[in-house]
Image: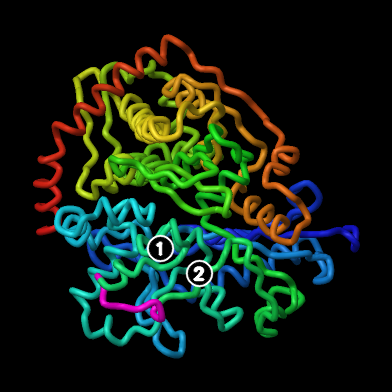
Amino acid sequence: MDKNRNIVIGVDIGTTSTKAVAFGERGKVVSSHAIDYPIVQPHPGWAEQDPDVIFSAVIKSVSAAMKKANIFPHQVKALGFSAAMHSLIALDESGRPLTRCIIWADNRSVMQSERLLKEMNGLAIYKRTGTPIHPMSPLPKLLWMKEEMPELFDKVHKFVSIKEYVLYQLYSQYVVDYSIASATGLFRLDTLDWDIDGLNLLGITRNHLSEPVPTTYMLRGMKKEWAEQMTLDPDIPVIVGASDGVLANVGVGAVLPGEAAITIGTSGAVRTISPVQKTDEKGRTFCYALTENHWVIGGPTNNGGILLRWLRDEFGSPEREVAKKLGIDPYDLLIQYAQNVPAGSEGLLFLPFLSGERAPYWNANARGTFFGISLHHKREHFIRAVMEGVCMSVFSVALAIRDLTGPLSEIRVSGGFAKSPFWRQMLSDMMGKELLVPETHEASALGAAVLALYALGEIHSLETVKEWIHITSHHTPNKNNTSLYLELFYMYERLYHRLKDEFDVIASFQRKG
């Protein structure tokens, strides 16, 4: 390749893998490499990962992306980071982990979350910090640790996220970008600093946390050991970047007010960018920092593509065998079956809360429910109902955002689901809106690279990314399906509220088990 080419590398530390993507001019992908890692679940409701395994994945993914395209160190202009939100690691004075990395999917702090909401003015905490009270958030996780592991809690030197841990390994500095910090429940949006009331509640000081810095903050002087392993110049500018969610908006070009990004991967999310901070009186949405002029309003769902994986793994043995013989992906076969069923799954409705739910209900006790099962329903009905349930959960978040920010004028989609034209059309029908499909599927990594260029002054606006992104397809809603889905969606909402108390009861039985 051209030895004078300028390369920016976006590193996306995700839930199931870390991916390094090398971008050339105008965001063109030059090479990429991903390293997968497992989620450890030592107890029901817990979800942890090994931080050193993830750090190793960062080093190996960058190294492999460099080698694949024969990129030389002097060709790399900068490196930018994206990372999953809400992770928590306790460190000792030497920076060694005292715990695994507790990730967003961990629900051990359900009781602490309920107390924060009911007894500790949780809505006021949300309005200060922009982070809804939920077990995903580090605030209730820390309260759980304080109450359930007091001896360990008292020994902790620093509480950090996975990105902070990675940066500490590379630079021996504890810094956290405003974006990751604003997803902790401990960071004030108005002052861009740690919330003293929250710290007092936990009995910790700001010294227990990293130094908050803008998402454009630049680090230099990487430890030579790691720079050499990644084939990078130790003095390369490394931009701390932001969270994967807000950077996904940048990576698909949804950067102006009214433009929304919908991501459905393992989980899902709907986000739009606002020039001002906004929180919801009902506490349905989050407000996270991107830059001083860009605030991301939105909501995550717990249940996206992970539900198709559940179907495949638990009920899809025949499909796996057939797919293996045909040499195709089992997911493609499941989706083919769903296409044989009309919209509405012939009266089968699914509440997709197998992992509890975040936005807009923020209810860790919510549970999955099939409603309307009849003898005429076959496995293809259940598959389609699951896919429709995921779309309904996304639609419920979009409606909450619309209440706060006004109508959504444009919707861009990304994530694993975006590879399925059938699923994309289903979502367009559900929302009654045209969907745009950007060419890139590496939205968060591209967002990290764009933010790095913005930090360096190479581009003067995040809107520049719009010129780089090619829209590969459009989906226009089928009005008949939209009308049917709207009727079913109102039933979906009614069912949730009628079952809410019962979810609490069944969840308590599961915890006892």
Indicate the quadrant where residue 377 lies.
top left
Q: Residue at x 42, y 23 (%)?
A: 430
- Image x and y of residue 156, in percent: 34, 83
User: Does the image show residue 173?
Assistant: yes
Badge 2 amino acid: Pro
Span colored in magenta: 201-208
The C terminus: image quadrant: bottom left
- Image x and y of residue 83, in percent: 52, 60
Q: Of helix, strand and loop, which one carries label 1? A: strand
Q: In 3D space, how far apart are the residues under numbered discs 2 and 1 (Cα atoms)?
A: 9 Å
Indicate the quadrant where residue 181 lies.
bottom left
Say if the magenta span includes residue 205: yes
Label 1 sits on residue:
187
Label 2 sits on residue:
212
Badge 1 amino acid: Phe
Q: Nearer the viewer, residue 57 or 122?
A: 122
Compared to 342, does 360 lie above or below?
A: below
Q: Residues within 10 Å of mark 2 (few under 14, many from 20)?
A: many
- Image x and y of residue 432, in percent: 46, 19
Q: Residue at x 14, y 53 (%)?
A: 510
Give yes or no for contact between labels 2 and 1 (Cβ–Cβ under 8 Å).
yes
